Image (spheres, grey):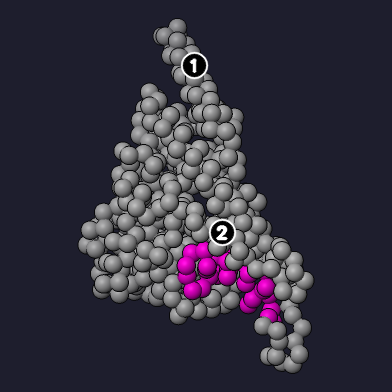
Amino acid sequence: MSNATEFLHSIPVDPLTGAISVPIYQTSTFVQEAPGVNKGYDYARSNNPTRAALEGIIAKLEKGSTAAAFSSGLAAIDAVIKLLKTGDEIVAVDDIYGGAFRLFTQVYEKFGIKITYVDTTDATNVFNAITPNTKLIWLETPTNPTLKISDIEAIAKIARASNCLLCVDSTFASPALQQPITLGADIVVHSATKYLGGHSDLIAGLVICKDAAVGEKIKFLQNACGAILSPFDSWLLIRGIETLHLRVKQHCINAGEVANWLATHPLVDKIYYPGLATHHNHDIAKKQSKGFGGIISFSLKEDTEAAAIAFVTSTKYFLLAESLGGIKSLISHPANMTHKSIPAAIRRANGVSDSLIRLSVGLEEAEDLIADLEQAFEKITANNSTTALSSLQTA
């Protein structure tokens, strides 16, 4: 967390008033001295001082040259894909966020952009999948929801040698833990809705570019397509980022305790958390990240949707909801929620089993969260026993 002090003091003080909080410029347009002569702003879709402050802050935090703020994480992903043209190809991580999969397959494939999905935990798979038409490598690391870890530095070398861009969706790590540009990535994407916002009160997306030339293309698309972040949401995001390092540090501590407890539970089949020594590519996660994050996924010994649904509807502190990264703990069932748009056969092949459960571990006391999970396990065990007894009595 050594960059926390530098970062906090990079948040600008308002030069006009001395306000320590970035002002909200809630305006749609700006008065000009003459046509084309202004104070740097003419129309709020093209630029806005509050959004510009946010973009400057996140560019510095991610060690990039340029940042652009969008109205959602998917709008940010959409802008990156618009860098491509018909005939171009993408090599993408197989365990991909369901919304990105839907965008790739149902929107951009019909425009002639081909996507090849591979297990990027082995960089050799990426190398073997690249063709002369490959223009973009798409990583999530950690992935959603099985927390796969890919070696950003190794894949960045492959991207450079193949003359294609490397984009890393670093939403699960956040810049408090991982800065992909410093490892060789060209573009970083965030669903800022998650850890960067941190309070489950906004929807936002960010694109950060290493090179100014690529950044200018993204800024052009931001203005031309119009999926901008509003001034108020930009201000909310700045406010969330101010406590990012503290929040993420505690998320990691809590998730580590919960993961270690789950790893020994008799009803748990597989557990996915990069902080466990048994996690595939744990050593790479330790090398490229300052911590292991606040997301845990696990499957049940009874690998059925019914068992998973019974569990996710039995918790008290883990609230059943989409999204992640907020101060309150959330629980979800990917097969029926975040990854419902992915065909079942593909979803299962990529490790998203029918009983897979995803936890976003919040800032409550870890012992309370563990007790909540324990009572949920006890509840479904009791229900199973009652059902079995009833079946015997009616047989």
Q: Position of residue 104 (x, y in %)?
A: 42, 61
Q: Position of residue 82 (x, y in %)?
A: 46, 72
Secondary element at tag 1 = helix
13 and 193: which one is in front? Answer: 13
Q: Above or below — where is 146 with respect to 156? A: above
Q: Is residue 36 magenta?
A: no
The residue where tag 2 is placed is 5
At label 1, counting other C-alpha atoms closer than 10 Å, the crowd grade (few under 14, some 14-19, many 20 or more) is few
312 and 344: which one is in front? Answer: 312
Q: Above or below — where is 28 with respect to 270? A: below
Outermost residue toward the top in this view: 393
Q: Above or below — where is 144 with respect to 211? A: above
Q: Residue drawn at (34%, 60%), measured in percent from left and top?
A: 152
Q: What stretch is highlighted in magenta?
A: 41-70
The tag earlier along the polypeptide, 1 or 2, is 2
Left or right, 119 with respect to 30, comes to left
Q: What residue type is labelled 1?
A: Ala
Secondary element at tag 2 = helix
